[in-house]
Amino acid sequence: MTTEGRRLPRALPSTVAAVPTPRSGTRAVTPGLPLALESPAEEPERRSRSVLAVGAVLLVVTVAALVVAFRIIVPAAPAAAPAPELVDTGVTEVQERPGTVVGYGQEYTYGDGLGVVVGYPQVYEPSDNATGFEGGSPVKAQVVVTNSTGESFRPNTIQVSATSGGQPVAGIWDPDQGVGLTGPDVNVPPGGMISFEVAFAVPDGGDLRLEIVPALYGYGAMVVEAL
């Protein structure tokens, strides 16, 4: 046999454009199919971005919900009340003017200029309308008030009490003879002077000690006794 009569097979036409290799990264192309327009590597990247976006949104919503829940559970502290404003009421603080111990016939002058002197007690005969002299010997004493202050003074604010031997004695009210338990209800202007009488039922042979307070506020007790 001769080799001339044999024909070698013709090479087949190439139907594959490229053969992929592990390192080439070239995609295999199937005959008759269109090439893909997008790379498969981009799909995982898009999914990762979507997951991150959703996670961020969920985190923001969770934080907002926690803030709202905290405000509901723990209420905000109430604002401190404003400090009250000081209002001038026009009332002047009364300063106490202390009294002292003096003898009968001695005048005592308080710090504001009010002077008080009590005369020596004298035995007297009460009228039929007098009250308060039962159980003792009635005596009376004259009280003289000199107003050397800058304001008017009303003697009916004077409080007079008496003791004998350390025991209280009753005051006598004798309107028929002008004897009262305090001064008259009149107005003594600055620079003026007034006198009135007080009386008490003193035990026989007992002493008489008076305590005089010119007014309820602002004056201390003035004690008058035999020195």
Image: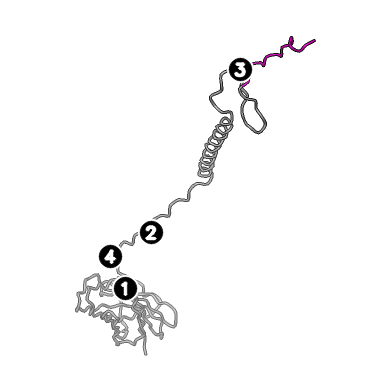
Q: Amino acid at mark 3?
A: Pro
Residue receiving disc 3 = 31
Q: Which residues are magenta?
A: 1-16
Percent position of residue 28, x then y: 63, 24
Residue receiving disc 2 = 83
Closer-to-camera residue (6/72): 6
Mark 4 is surrounded, within 10 Å at the Cα level, by few (under 14), some (14 to 19) or many (20 or more) other residues, namely few
The answer to which of marks 3 and 4 sits earlier in the sequence is 3
Element carrying mark 1: loop
Distance of label 2 from label 4 (alpha carbons): 21 Å
The answer to which of marks 2 and 3 sits earlier in the sequence is 3
Outermost residue toward the right in this view: 1
Q: Amino acid at mark 4?
A: Gly
User: How would you classify the magenta stretch by its main secondary structure?
Assistant: loop
Mark 3 is surrounded, within 10 Å at the Cα level, by few (under 14), some (14 to 19) or many (20 or more) other residues, namely few
Q: Amino acid at mark 1?
A: Ala
- Could you tell me which quadrant the N terminus lies in? top right
Of circles 2 and 4, the one toward us is 2
Disc marking residue 90: 4
Residue receiving disc 1 = 215
